[in-house]
Amino acid sequence: MDRPIGMFDSGFGGLTVARALIDLLPAEHVVYIGDTGRYPYGPRPQAEVAGFARELAWSLVKEHDAKAIVVACNTASAAAIDELKDELPVPVIDVIEPGARALVDATRSGRAGVIGTVGTIGSGAYLRAVAAAGPHVHLTSAACPGFVEFVERGQTSGDEITVLAERLLSPVQDADVDALLLGCTHYPYLARVISDVMGPAVTLVSSADETAFVACTHLRELGLLREPTDEPVEHRFLSSGDIAWFTDLGRRLLGPELGAAERWQPAG
Ligand code: DGL
C-alpha cells in the first residue's frame, strides 16, 4: 500500500505525532498539513474548528490520496471526530481515546489530570473518554491558553512560560494528581517546563506517542501498512501560513525529514 498517511494540526503541534509515527513506521509516506495560517484553534467555536478539520481531512484524501487520516490535534478531534469518522472513506485515528486509555493505565492513585486548549477542555471530550476507559479514575482538567502560542513562536523554555505554567497548572497540582495527560499535541514541546512545575512524582503522558501506537496497530490490522522497499520514503509538509517559518521551526522541532515545506491553500 504505497499511499501516504495523512495528518493535520492547527500548526506545529501535530509534528509531535508525526515524529512518533515516522519513528514507529519508517517505511510509511506521510503528508502533514499544519494550518498555521488559522492557528490557534483552541479559542475558536467548535463548529468553526469542525469546518477546518473537514476541509483539511478531505484535502488529504482528495489531493494526496491519503489511505488513513491521523487527526493530530486534540481540539479538532474534540470538535469533529464523529463527523470525520462518518464521512471519510478512509480510517480516521484520533488523539483523544489513545491518550485517555494511556492516562488510565498510568495513574496509580486514581487521581489523574489532563491539560489542553480551551476548546478541548470545554468540550468535555476527555471527561467522557476517561470515564469510558477507567470509571474509577477521578479526572481534573485545566485549560492552558497561551501554551500553544509560545510553541508556535518557537519558545519552549524560559521564565515567561514557567510563570504561566505555575498559574495554569495549579488546579491539577491542587488535585494531587499522579499522572498528567498532555491533551494538546503542542504540549510535549513544553514537557520540560511542565514536568519541572508538576514535580518528579507526576508522570506525564503524551497523547502524541499513544496515538502513533494506535495508528500503527490499526493500520496493521487493516492490512494498510506499506512493505519496506528500496524505493525512498516521501514525507511532505504543507502549511497555510508562512512557509519559510514553517520550514525553519518545523525542522528544528521535527528533525531532518522536514525538507522544504509547501503551501496549502484553504478554500475560504
Ligand atoms: N495542537 C492542537 C491540539 O492538540 C491545538 C492547537 C491550537 O489551539 O491551535 O489541541
Image: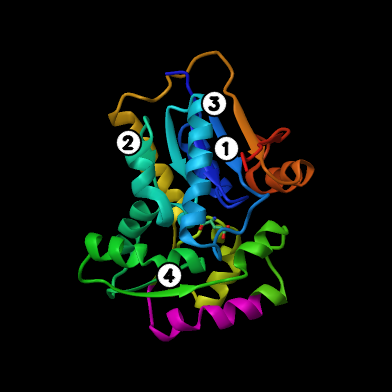
Mark 2 packing: few (<14 Cα in 10 Å), some, or many (20+)? some
Part of the protein shown in magenta: 162-178
Q: Give yes or no for contact between labels 2 and 3 (Cβ–Cβ under 8 Å).
A: no
Q: Where is residue 215 drawn, in percent x and y? A: 38, 39
Q: Secondary structure at mark 2?
A: helix
Alpha carbons under labels 1 and 4: distance apart:
27 Å
**Which callout, 3 or 1, points at the residue further toward the start of the chain?**
1
Q: Secondary structure at mark 4?
A: helix
Q: Which mark is residue 122?
A: 4
Mark 4 packing: few (<14 Cα in 10 Å), some, or many (20+)? some
* Residue that badge 3 annotates: 64
Does the magenta portion include 168?
Answer: yes
Q: Nearer the viewer, mark 2 or mark 4?
A: 4
Q: Give yes or no for contact between labels 1 and 4 (Cβ–Cβ under 8 Å).
A: no
Who is closer to the viewer here, 47 or 6? Answer: 47
Left or right for 142, reference 220: right
Which kind of residue does numbered mark 1 sit on?
Tyr
Q: Quadrant of the N terminus?
A: top left
* Residue that badge 1 annotates: 32
Number of numbered discs present? 4
Q: Where is residue 58 drawn, in percent x and y? A: 48, 34
Q: Give the image's coloring scheme.
A: rainbow
Does the magenta portion include 167?
Answer: yes
Q: Which mark is residue 218?
A: 2
Which kind of residue does numbered mark 2 sit on?
His
Alpha carbons under labels 2 and 4: distance apart:
29 Å
Q: Secondary structure at mark 1?
A: strand
Q: Which quadrant of the frame does ligand 1 lie within?
A: bottom right
**Which callout, 4 or 3, points at the residue further toward the start of the chain?**
3
